Image (cartoon, helix red, strand yellow):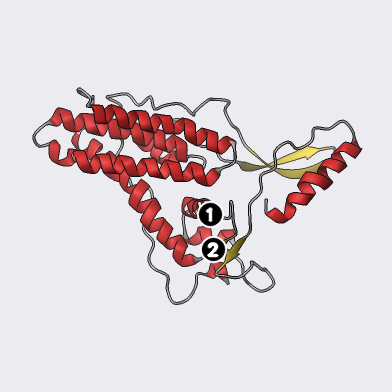
């Protein structure tokens, strides 16, 4: 919620609940600062708005989710700008996370067709795997404390580390002279990608589900809510609900060697610079 709702949810609403009877009171209130747009306050009457449907007609949902979380008003007022949205998408979401996923899966699929069996791992391999698995715990703790930006930034920092590892090891070159070592590097990278997918699912559920399938899984990692019609006491109403399995998915990667990998596809698309006219979502 925005900070202007804090008083209601911490004072007025608990008082109403106390007056109504023996009801559980809120024990954790999560609020943010204000989000502005292009230097001005949002205002429907003045046309200073972003309509979600208009944005989703033009952009992927995860691109918007990423920008609103990584640059959102969690601790201070922030400004939504189309140019920064495009920059964050291209320079971070595509160039860091999307690039890591693409070159890892493309090279694994092209050269092995499955998760390669690792040979002897090096200290650098083991250290990276441990860092990424440790990050699962850190990100989980940050999410529990509603420190969403910290969680997302840490996950992206880990993705950058894996990119550096791949750039150093260069399995696309090593495959020509040492197939076993190239397979080991790609196995390590795939395990890291699998763990990062778990960390990023709360922020990027749609692309994470696609990646889940590209890693050879067949289940649903990110169940989505849906609108259902219910009848009760002679009236009918719609409810946002869903089926969510009580399964602990926040576990280190169990990606096993030999698992078939389907042909990979790009997770995200690079966005062009803004045209002279702003997108219709801001009109």
Q: Position of residue 158 (x, y in %)?
A: 38, 40
Sequence-wise, which precedes: disc 1 or disc 2? 1
The residue under label 2 is 80
Which residue is painted at 8% across and 34% down in the image?
Answer: 177
Count of marks overlaid on the render: 2
Return the x and y of residue 201 as percentages of the image width and height.
48, 39
* Residue 19 shown left or right of residue 177 in the figure: right
Which quadrant of the figure has residue 171?
top left
Image quadrant occupied by the C terminus: bottom right
Task: Please tell me which residue lies in front, 245 or 48.
Answer: 48
Tag 1 and tag 2, C-beta contact below 8 Å:
yes
Residue 90 location in percent, x, y? 37, 57
Question: Is 251 above or below relative to 206?
Answer: above
Tag on residue 68?
A: 1
Q: Is residue 232 left or right of residue 68?
A: right
> Secondary structure beneath disc 1?
helix
Q: Does residue 148 appear in this view?
A: yes
Front residue of 246 and 155: 155
Alpha-carbon neighbours of circle 2 within 10 Å: few (<14), some, or many (≥20)? Answer: many
């Amino acid at each position: 919620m925005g900070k202007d709702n804090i008083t209601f949810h911490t004072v007025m609403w608990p008082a109403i609940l106390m007056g109504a009877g023996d009801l559980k009171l809120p024990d954790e209130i999560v609020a943010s600062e204000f989000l502005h747009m292009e230097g001005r306050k949002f205002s429907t009457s003045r046309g200073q708005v972003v309509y979600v449907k208009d944005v989703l007609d033009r952009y992927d949902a995860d691109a918007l989710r990423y920008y609103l979380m990584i640059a959102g008003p969690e601790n201070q007022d922030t400004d939504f700008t189309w140019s920064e949205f495009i920059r964050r998408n291209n320079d971070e979401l595509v160039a860091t996370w999307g690039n890591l996923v693409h070159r890892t899966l493309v090279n694994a699929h092209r050269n092995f067709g499955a998760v390669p069996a690792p040979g002897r791992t090096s200290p650098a391999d083991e250290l990276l795997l441990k860092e990424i698995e440790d990050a699962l715990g850190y990100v989980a703790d940050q999410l529990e404390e509603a420190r969403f930006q910290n969680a997302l930034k840490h996950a992206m920092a880990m993705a950058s580390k894996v990119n550096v590892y791949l750039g150093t090891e260069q399995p696309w070159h090593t495959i020509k002279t040492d197939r076993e070592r190239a397979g080991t590097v790609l196995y390590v990278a795939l395990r890291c990608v699998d763990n990062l997918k778990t960390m990023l699912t709360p922020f990027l559920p749609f692309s994470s589900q696609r990646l889940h399938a590209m890693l050879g899984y067949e289940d649903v990692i990110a169940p989505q809510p849906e609108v259902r019609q219910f009848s009760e006491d002679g009236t009918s109403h719609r409810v946002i609900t869903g089926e969510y399995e009580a399964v602990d998915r926040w576990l280190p990667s169990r990606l096993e060697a030999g698992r078939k990998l389907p042909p990979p596809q790009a997770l995200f698309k690079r966005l062009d610079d803004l045209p002279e006219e702003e997108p219709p979502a801001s009109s």
